[in-house]
Amino acid sequence: MAPRRASRETDLRRRPALREPRDSFMVICEGKTEANYLVGLRRRGGPQIHVAVAKRSDARCIVQEAAESSDSGYSEVWAVFDTECRDISAVSRDAAVKDVALAVSHPCFEVWLLLHHKDHRAPFQSSQDAADLLRRVTPRWAKGDGTRFTEFADGVDAACARAKKLDPSGKAHHLNPSTNVWMLVERLDVARGPGERT
């Protein structure tokens, strides 16, 4: 008679999934125009992006508010604002010390939006000039709550390429026009991973 084998107990408990923790980004924006665009961008999938409008629109205050978020466990913290044709070199140094990445547009975020639709390299006299040109190119666009990502979704890659031509380093915030929002977009794409990109 063959010896009986010892029976093995089956563990039916669910094993925890071995999943890498997702990157998470905190983005503090100067206004609703930037925030609405980035909320739309967030819908493409990928990392967790928390978007908030800053309590105050001064660049130094936006960086400080972003820095205060860095203790909340985010992988990266970004401040998104316009230069309004001002020198922001002191703010840039402060952001570097506080480990806050900058997505800055000169003179304004409308430059970034415009680059989704056309290559533009001529300087702007003011933020209003940039907004007026964007409105001529994208008639349905309106500042603030009138900014809908769907009107720009097809031009994200083109905007990145055009913005890099204006400022390849992403750090020449004094150039008119310029925007390094492409750096934030590319960071989000890297965090998204090749299998998740659209």
Image: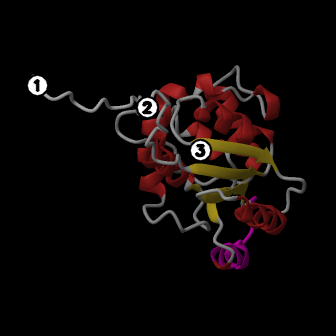
Residue 137: name its quadrant. top right
Q: Position of residue 73 (x, y in %)?
A: 67, 59
Magenta-drawn segment: 84-96
Residue 49: name its quadrant. top right
Under circle 3, the secondary element is: helix
Work out whether 14 lies above or below 178.
Answer: above
Q: Position of residue 45 (x, y in %)?
A: 53, 32
Q: Nearer the viewer, mark 3 or mark 2?
A: 2
Q: Position of residue 6 (x, y in %)?
A: 27, 33
Q: How many marks?
A: 3
Q: Residue at x 60, y 22 (%)?
A: 150
In the rendered image, is residue 32 in sight? Answer: yes
For the residue carrying disc 1, how many other residues have a C-alpha within 10 Å: few (<14), some (14-19), or many (20+)? few
In the picture, the quarter occupied by the C terminus is top left
Q: Which residue is mark 2?
A: 11
Is residue 130 one of those drawn in magenta?
no
Kind of residue indicated by mark 3: Trp
Q: Nearer the viewer, mark 2 or mark 1?
A: 1
